[in-house]
Amino acid sequence: MRHALTAVLAAVSLSSIATAQTSTETTTTSQPAAAQSTDAASVQQVRSNAIGEAIAGDMEGLMTLYRDLHANPELSLQEVNTAAKLAKRLKALKFDVTEKVGGTGVVAVMKNGSGPVLLIRADMDGLPVVEQTGLEFASKVRTKTPEGVETGVMHACGHDTHMTAFIETAKLMAARKKDWDGTLVMILQPAEEVGKGARDMLEDGLYTRFPRPTHALAFHDAANIAAGQIGYTPGYALANVDSVDIVVKGLGGHGAYPQTTRDPIVLGSRIVTSLQTLVSREQDPQDPAVVTVGSFQGGAKHNIIPDEAKLLLTIRSYSDDTRAKLIEGIRRISRGEAIAAGVPDDRMPVVTVQDEFTPSTYNPPEFAEEMAGVLKGHFPDGQVIKTSAVMGGEDFGRFYRADKSIKSFIFWVGGVPADKMTAAQAGQASLPSLHSPFWAPQADKVIATASEAMTVMALDILKKR
C-alpha cells in the first residue's frame, strides 16, 4: 500500500515479534463441542467451520510459502520470480493461467458454469526498505532501484501475507466447485507500491482478454488492528495519492551579498508556509485532504545562494474534484509567491505532477454492508468492525473506476499481536506502521483470517441460484 496507515514508527521488541511470527496459531471459528448449542446461530457456526478447519490443516504449508515470499521480495515491476512461483501453484490447481499481463502480472481463470464473474486480487511487490525485524527468515535481498540507489528489499507492507492468503483462497475455491457457479478471475498484480500495476494490467486487456468482472475483492493487512480482526469501510476507504515536484527558480550568488540574488530557498520557504492554507483555509473541513512537503532540497555550501531549490510533496484527497482543486492551488500559490518575490516570468516555479498517481479506493456502500453482513454472520461477534477511511493509497480502486458497475470491496485484516495491541492501547508501547522496517504482522492470523473471509464472501457471491 502506498504510504501506509497512520501509526507511530518505533522499534518494538524484536524477540517477541519473532516469537509471534513463528507461531502456527490460526484463527478459526471452531468451538469446543461442549460449548456448542442447538440454536440456529450455532448450527450455522458448525456448518461454516469446515473452511476454517481446512485452512488449519494447510497452515504448515502456508507458513512455508509465506516465509519464502518474505525472504525473497522483489521491487515494483521486478516481480519475475514471485510471479513465476505463484503461477505454477495456480496451474497445479487447474486454473487457466496467463503470465506477463501488464508486465509481471498473472491472471488465473476458473470457469465453473454460468453466474457472476468474481475478480480476486493480491499485490506482489516489496519495498526498498532494509529489514530490521530480527526474524529468522528476514529478507537479506539487496538490489538497485530504477534510480540506481542500492537498497535492501522488504515486504514491509505485508504483500507476502496477501499472496499467501490468495493462494489458499484459490485452493479452497477449486476444492469446492460443487458449491458455486460462475467464473473466478484471480489476479496477481505488480507495482502497487508505485501506483502502476493495476493500470498496466487494465491497459494490457484485463477486461477484454479475460472475463469482465461483475464483482471484485481484495484485502490489506493492517498495522493498527489486532491480529485476526476484520475491518471494513463503506464508501471512500483509501485516498487519491499524488506525488508533486516543485522546482523553485531564483538567481544565485554570494551569501554575503543577498541583494544581488533572488533566493530560491527563501521563496521555497514562503511556498511551504502558504501551501498549508490549502487545507486549513480553502478546504471544507468535512472533506479531508493532506498537503505534505516531504523534502526541501537546495544549496550545497554555507555561503552560496543557489539558483534553484526543489520541493517534493505528497497530496491526499478522496474526491477527484478535491484532487484537482489542490493541484491547481499548488500551481497558483507557487506562482503567486514567486511574483511577490520579484522573480521574472521566465523563472517561475515549475510544478510537475508525477506519473505515480494512485486513485482513491471506493467501496460502494450497499455492497460493503452486504459483504460485512456475510462476514458478521460467519465470524464470532466483535471480530468484524467498521473502520474509518484512511489517507493511505491503494491502486485496487482502479478496477472499480474502470467499470463502476462492478461491486467492489476491499477490507482490512489486523496483524498486530494481541499483547502488543493491549500494551499500545494502555500507552505502554508504540507500534510500527506499515512500511516500517520493524513491521512483522502475526502472519498466521492474517493469512488464516483473510483466506477464510475471502472464501466465505466468494462462495456467497457465486452461490448456486
Image (spheres, grey):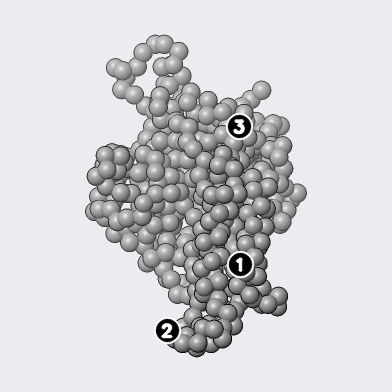
Is residue 207 rendered to the left or right of residue 314? right
Please state which amino acid type lies under the numbered disc 3. Answer: Pro
Q: Mark 3 points at which residue?
A: 365
Q: Which of marks 1 and 3 is in front?
A: 1
**At which x and y percent is residue 415?**
38, 44
Q: How many labels does the image show?
A: 3
Quarter of the image for residue 442 reads: top left
Q: Which of marks 1 and 2 is in front?
A: 1
The residue closer to the viewer here, 456 or 370, is: 370
> In the rendered view, does 168 fall on the left or right side of 94?
left
Q: Where is residue 321 in the image (x, y as percent from the top left)?
A: 68, 47
**Residue that protrudes farthest toward the front in the picture:** 259
Q: What element carries label 2?
A: loop
Q: Is residue 256 above or below residue 228?
A: below
Residue at figure coordinates x 47%, y 85% from the top left = 255
- Residue bearing mark 1: 337
Q: What type is the residue that disc 2 sits on?
A: His
Crowd tier of the residue under label 1, counting other residues whose Cα lies within 10 Å: few below 14, some 14–19, many 20 or above: some
Q: Quadrant of residue 259?
A: bottom right
Q: Horizontal and vertical percent for residue 378?
A: 47, 25
Tell me which label, 1 or 3, sits earlier in the chain: 1
Residue 298 visible? The answer is yes
Residue at image mark 2: 302
Of the 4 image quadrants, the one containing the C terminus is top right
Q: What element carries label 3?
A: helix
Instruction: Give above or below for 366 relative to 252.
Output: above
